[in-house]
Image: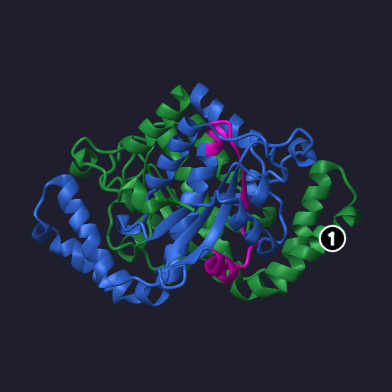
Chain colours: A blue, B green
């Protein structure tokens, strides 16, 4: 159970960091690992209907700030990740995944016809096709959960950012016409010594209230 | 970087388990740790607008099966987690969190009035109030991402389940009238020796396609 203890300790250690130390940067090797946790995120059908924008340009960060409820994490963090989700799902998205599976696993694309039709009948032409952006945004949240847990394990602070104006982000990040829209963001880096939120007790409801056995 | 390697190894090891060994159960202590990772999930404002139902009753599992595209993971896994999200957010949800913060941190509820009003003006009466269930469902997906990463780290197999009929789940799990609705599910346990999917190469797009520096 020592691994479980290490994991729970990390999840207790983490908190939504309000003040980042702007002078501390995540080392390149460590960042590369965090980036891979994003890439390895599981998604519905494996469709990966998102792109992760790492906003490092100071001018872009400054432009995003007023559209992020002026939360200084946007400009002070080491790495600022904007999760963008597909605006809609097209047959080409499915074809692209099939081609990728075929290449990675060395199987003929035709052998995946059943899988292809299942995806087309759901997220493109079926029930999820009508809510494809929302479905894609939910996949971004899997990545967000994965990333925050990974960061905690690696001793990196994070603050999830839902308080933002997606349309303004889209404009500043030039997403219009790309087929992707802003879903959520996450600031990563290292807490400032003076962040008083770091010392506050974590607030969660009782396990018995959140978790119920059926 | 050994911790980063361990994490990435775990994320490579995991896969959407298609066949669980129905005879292998997650030990109680290990399950308790996974349950705590759910409880510790970060959420917007800390509102925790969800409940996690652990469906262990065989009759309920059997009833859910046909509404889960007959995916046998529902009945064969060790622990079956159904993520349910608030149907709407009311002032009482905010009051409850404020009371909890007050109790856990030993501060007067009145000192949190600014925070209370911010939440009321957003997820209850503001823009997110109109899409409160969807907002709550997204929080479930943070928990899902967190849980899948945690499970992989602890050597527990998992399969996220989006292929299900939420309304049928709600009926079988008697959620109508509780203020919660099914968002997504996750089967956890141990892969069967014969699950051919375990050996397949993981399919992800190139890092350069998914991650872009701005």
Tell me the residue that label 1 is attached to. Answer: B114
Q: Chain of mark 1?
A: B
- Up the image or down, B196 lies above or below A13; here it is below
- Residue B104 position by quadrant: top right
Q: Residue at x 64, y 61 (%)?
A: A63
Tag 1, which secondary structure?
Answer: helix
Question: Any magenta on residue A77?
Answer: no
Q: Residue B94: x percent and y percent?
A: 75, 62
Q: Residue at x 19, y 68 (%)?
A: A117
Segment colored magenta: A151-172
- Up the image or down, B28 lies above or below B135; here it is above
Q: Residue at x 55, y 48 (%)?
A: A56
- Residue B176 position by quadrant: bottom right
Q: Residue A171: x percent and y percent?
A: 54, 69
Q: Residue at x 34, y 65 (%)?
A: B67
Question: Any magenta on residue A169?
Answer: yes
Badge 1 local density, few (<14 within 10 Å), some, or many (20+)? few
In this picture, residue B84 sits left or right of residue B66: right
Q: Residue B209: x percent and y percent?
A: 34, 53
Instruction: Tell which of A175 and B93 is nearer to you.
Output: A175
Instruction: Tell which of B14 and A76 is nearer to you.
Output: A76
Instruction: Tell which of A67 and B7 is nearer to you.
Output: A67
Residue B134 appearing in the image: no
In this picture, residue B146 sits left or right of residue B116: left
């Amino acid at each position: 159970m020592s691994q479980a203890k290490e994991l729970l300790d990390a999840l207790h250690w983490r908190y939504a960091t309000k003040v980042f130390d702007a002078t501390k940067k995540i080392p390149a090797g460590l960042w590369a690992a965090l980036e891979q946790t994003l890439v390895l995120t599981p998604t519905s059908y494996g469709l990966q209907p998102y792109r992760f924008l790492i906003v490092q340009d100071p001018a872009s960060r400054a432009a995003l700030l007023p559209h992020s409820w002026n939360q200084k994490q946007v400009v002070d963090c080491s790495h600022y990740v904007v999760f963008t989700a597909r605006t809609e799902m097209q047959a080409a998205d499915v074809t692209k995944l099939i081609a990728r599976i075929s290449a990675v696993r060395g199987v003929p694309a035709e052998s995946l016809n059943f899988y292809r039709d299942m995806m087309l009948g759901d997220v493109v032409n079926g029930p999820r096709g009508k809510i494809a952006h929302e479905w894609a945004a939910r996949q971004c949240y899997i990545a967000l959960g994965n990333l925050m847990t990974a960061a905690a394990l690696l001793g990196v602070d994070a603050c999830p950012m839902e308080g933002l104006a997606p349309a303004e982000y889209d404009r500043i990040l030039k997403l219009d016409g790309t087929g992707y829209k802003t879903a959520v963001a996450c600031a990563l880096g290292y807490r400032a010594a003076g962040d008083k939120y770091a010392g506050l007790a974590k607030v969660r409801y009782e396990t018995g209230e959140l978790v119920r056995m059926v």
